[in-house]
């Protein structure tokens, strides 16, 4: 009986990843939506992508903070490392919104990468300062079959100005999708022969 329980426990993360892979493949490789996390009040954007590269390669791109601007295809106007110390990396980001009418800026403090037993890796950036009321970004990378990964982004940015929630949701969903595409595409390029 113990062996059966161990076999089920070992297969559970892979079965979960298989379900995600099937769902993402059916959706064309990427999905995005808005949601309110349990225990929170703010609306976050969520995006996920099936990446043809292992988690370690995706993580290298996702933690390449100095090159966020280069990976963003114009969404991030400026990015630079502000501070790096054990357990935290501060990154300055400048992002035009509303077709460039307003520029949001923020310094996010990113935690070190957290590694779980099933191979999942994640890290979170939280607002230190900026011209926004709130900002948070969590990147999660999970192993998937055949040396692939599922990369996810949960993104919150609450501007100081009043804006329709539908417009904020739309901008955040697109930004979260751009983030997973940037990390995923760059990881696939790095993995390519």
Image: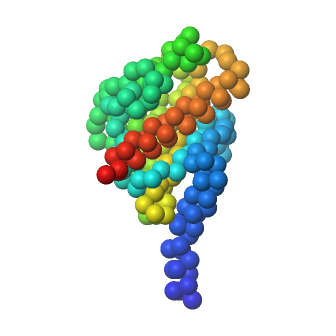
Question: Which corner quadrant of the image does residue 23 belong to?
Answer: bottom right
Q: Estimate the x, y position of residue 65 in percent, counting from the top left.
A: 35, 34
Residue 10 seen in the figure: yes
Residue 138 seen in the figure: no
Q: Quadrant of the N terminus?
A: bottom right
53, above or below 33, in the image: below
Q: Estimate the x, y position of residue 143 in percent, counting from the top left.
A: 46, 59
154, above or below 17, in the image: above
- Residue at the farthest bottom position: 1
Residue in the foreground of this view, choosing between 12 and 88:
12
The residue under the point 45% across, 23% down is 74
Residue in the foreground of this view, choosing between 42 and 49:
49
Q: How many marks?
A: 0
Q: Estimate the x, y position of residue 170 in percent, counting from the top left.
A: 65, 29
The residue under the point 66% across, 16% down is 162
- Residue at the farthest top position: 101
The residue under the point 56% across, 77% down is 8
Q: Estimate the x, y position of residue 157 in percent, counting from the top left.
A: 56, 28
Image side of residue 123 versus residue 12, left or right: left
Q: Specify how the rendered protein is coloured.
A: rainbow
Image side of residue 49 versus residue 55, left or right: right
- Residue at the farthest front position: 193
51, above or below 119, in the image: above
52, above or below 12, in the image: above
The residue under the point 51% across, 34% down is 178
């Amino acid at each position: 009986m113990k062996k059966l329980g161990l076999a089920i426990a070992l297969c559970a993360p892979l079965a979960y990843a298989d379900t995600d892979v099937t769902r993402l493949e059916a959706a064309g490789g990427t999905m995005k939506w808005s949601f309110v996390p349990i225990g929170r009040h703010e609306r976050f954007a969520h995006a996920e992508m099936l990446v043809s590269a292992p988690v370690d390669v995706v993580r290298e791109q996702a933690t390449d903070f100095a090159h966020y601007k280069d990976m963003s295809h114009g969404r991030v106007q400026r990015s630079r490392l502000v501070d790096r110390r054990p357990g935290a990396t501060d990154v300055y980001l400048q992002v035009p919104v509303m077709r460039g009418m307003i520029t949001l800026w923020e310094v996010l403090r990113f935690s070190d990468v957290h590694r779980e037993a099933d191979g999942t890796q994640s890290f979170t950036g939280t607002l230190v300062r900026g011209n926004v009321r709130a900002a948070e970004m969590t990147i999660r990378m999970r192993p998937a079959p055949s040396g692939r990964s599922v990369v996810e982004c949960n993104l919150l940015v609450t501007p100081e100005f009043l804006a329709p929630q539908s417009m904020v949701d739309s901008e955040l969903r697109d930004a979260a999708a751009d983030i997973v595409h940037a990390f995923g595409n760059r990881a696939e390029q790095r993995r390519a022969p």
